[in-house]
């Protein structure tokens, strides 16, 4: 084997392995690569892998067809984020060409390798989440669940979502059991303005001349999927605070991005206990400390979970907390269809992984 060809193969495998390593549990980008390779091998041999415009858009549909069958969902990230897959630091066309050559030479071994990594990661996820699903308020240990994601290489990229769910389940349970309400009212001296803008106040503030006070239950809401850089808003409350979940290391640039991307002047940051002093120092340096309402640490979460599950008011909170946690986990982390017709029809189990050697 020529030296240049060997370098290309090694570089291609390194690029693919890095993509797999940094992918979250849904595995959208590796699946897209696998489907491009499959279509090149079995559907359209004339597909030119050196020209990404031949597959950049259509491969999203190929990926979605598979992910919908496997996971019951498809990628909803921005088009720009999806197209980052073909950047120089990911899988550019010259890397994809080498992967395509290897895949054709081995009868689909690169595809098989990608899907084996996908199934292995979901096996790790199932083991971690089974712990939660089988636990009760008497034996659930939130630190154990966090550590199961933190210590498993295949799950680290999904730790931020788990962290977000843990915070949401706790906050929403305590607020609901406390029966907190939020009141919005207008000064009686402003009723002439209300009369002038009653259509506005009724539509936007739920207040009019006949009902100058609006009372509603306090709630926290999850925003949904966080962006690739893990910045911005994760949760918000209808009484004011914006909540940013941060389990990764924070530097000055990221601290500024967090605060600048959230317009609220009441930000709650949830972070690892060891990060608290660093975060406070950075926020002070960039002049944003006054916008932080509080910093909640992982130690705080562990203590509050213990109180909610096994403390004085566990009968009111325990089962509700576990139920919310399970519901959010089931919604966030998809179960894998192990009987996928698409994958079983390709017989990847007959293909070995030693083609890289």
Image: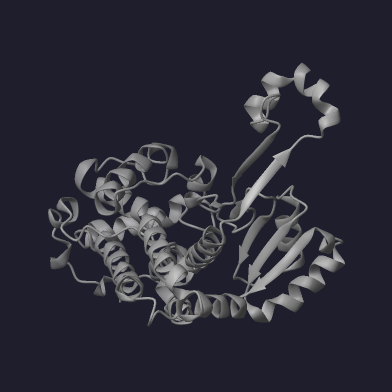
Q: Quadrant of the C terminus?
A: bottom left
Query: Would you say residue 250 is visible in this rendering?
Result: no
Query: Would you say residue 156 is visible in this rendering?
Result: yes
Left or right? Give the position of 327 relative to 134. Answer: right
- Viewer-side residue, 182 vs 289: 182
Q: Quadrant of the N terminus?
A: bottom left
**Residue located 22% across and 57% down the image:** 337
Q: Position of residue 356 (x, y in %)?
A: 31, 72
Q: Is 81 located above or below residue 165 in the figure?
A: above
- Viewer-side residue, 205 vs 95: 205
- Viewer-side residue, 184 vs 247: 184
Q: Position of residue 251 (x, y in %)?
A: 72, 69
Colour scheme of this structure image?
Answer: one colour
- Viewer-side residue, 36 vs 288: 288
Q: Position of residue 288 (x, y in %)?
A: 83, 60
Left or right? Give the position of 172 relative to 291. Answer: left
Q: Position of residue 148 (x, y in %)?
A: 42, 79
**Residue located 72% across and 58% down the image:** 267
**Residue located 71% across and 24% down the image:** 209
Residue 193, image quadrant:
top right
Task: Name, please, the residue furthest toward the top.
Answer: 196
Q: Is 258 located above or below residue 317 in the figure?
A: above
**Residue located 26% across and 53% down the image:** 70
Give the number of marks: 0
Left or right? Give the position of 131 relative to 340. Answer: right
């Amino acid at each position: 084997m020529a030296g240049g060809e060997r370098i290309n193969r090694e570089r291609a495998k390194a690029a693919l392995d890095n993509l797999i390593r940094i992918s979250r549990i849904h595995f959208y980008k590796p699946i897209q690569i696998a489907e491009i390779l499959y279509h090149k091998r079995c559907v359209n041999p004339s597909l030119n892998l050196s020209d990404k415009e031949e597959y950049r858009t259509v491969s999203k549909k190929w990926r979605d067809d598979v992910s919908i069958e496997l996971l019951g969902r498809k990628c909803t990230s921005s088009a720009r984020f999806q197209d980052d897959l073909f950047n120089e630091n990911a899988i550019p066309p010259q890397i994809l060409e080498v992967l395509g050559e290897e895949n054709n030479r081995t009868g689909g071994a690169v595809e098989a390798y990608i899907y084996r990594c996908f199934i292995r990661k979901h096996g790790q996820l199932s083991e971690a989440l089974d712990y939660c699903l089988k636990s009760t308020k008497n034996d659930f240990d939130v630190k154990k669940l966090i550590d199961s994601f933190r210590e498993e290489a295949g799950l680290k990229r999904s730790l931020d979502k788990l962290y977000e769910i843990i915070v949401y389940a706790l906050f929403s349970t305590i607020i609901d059991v406390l029966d907190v309400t939020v009141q919005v009212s207008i000064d009686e001296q402003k009723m002439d303005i209300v009369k002038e803008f009653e259509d506005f106040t009724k539509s936007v503030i739920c207040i009019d001349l006949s009902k100058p006070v609006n009372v509603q239950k306090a709630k926290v809401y999850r925003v949904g999927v966080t962006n690739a850089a893990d910045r911005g808003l994760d949760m918000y409350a209808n009484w004011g605070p914006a909540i940013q979940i941060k389990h990764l290391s924070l530097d000055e640039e990221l601290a500024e991005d967090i605060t600048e991307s959230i317009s609220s002047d009441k930000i709650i940051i949830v972070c690892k206990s060891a990060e608290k002093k660093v975060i406070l120092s950075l926020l002070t340096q960039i002049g944003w400390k006054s916008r932080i309402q509080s910093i909640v640490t992982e130690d705080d979460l562990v203590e509050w979970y213990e109180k909610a599950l096994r403390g004085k008011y566990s009968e009111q909170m325990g089962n509700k907390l576990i139920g919310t946690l399970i519901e959010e986990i089931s919604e966030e982390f998809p179960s894998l269809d192990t009987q996928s017709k698409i994958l079983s029809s390709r017989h990847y189990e007959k293909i070995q992984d030693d083609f890289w050697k």
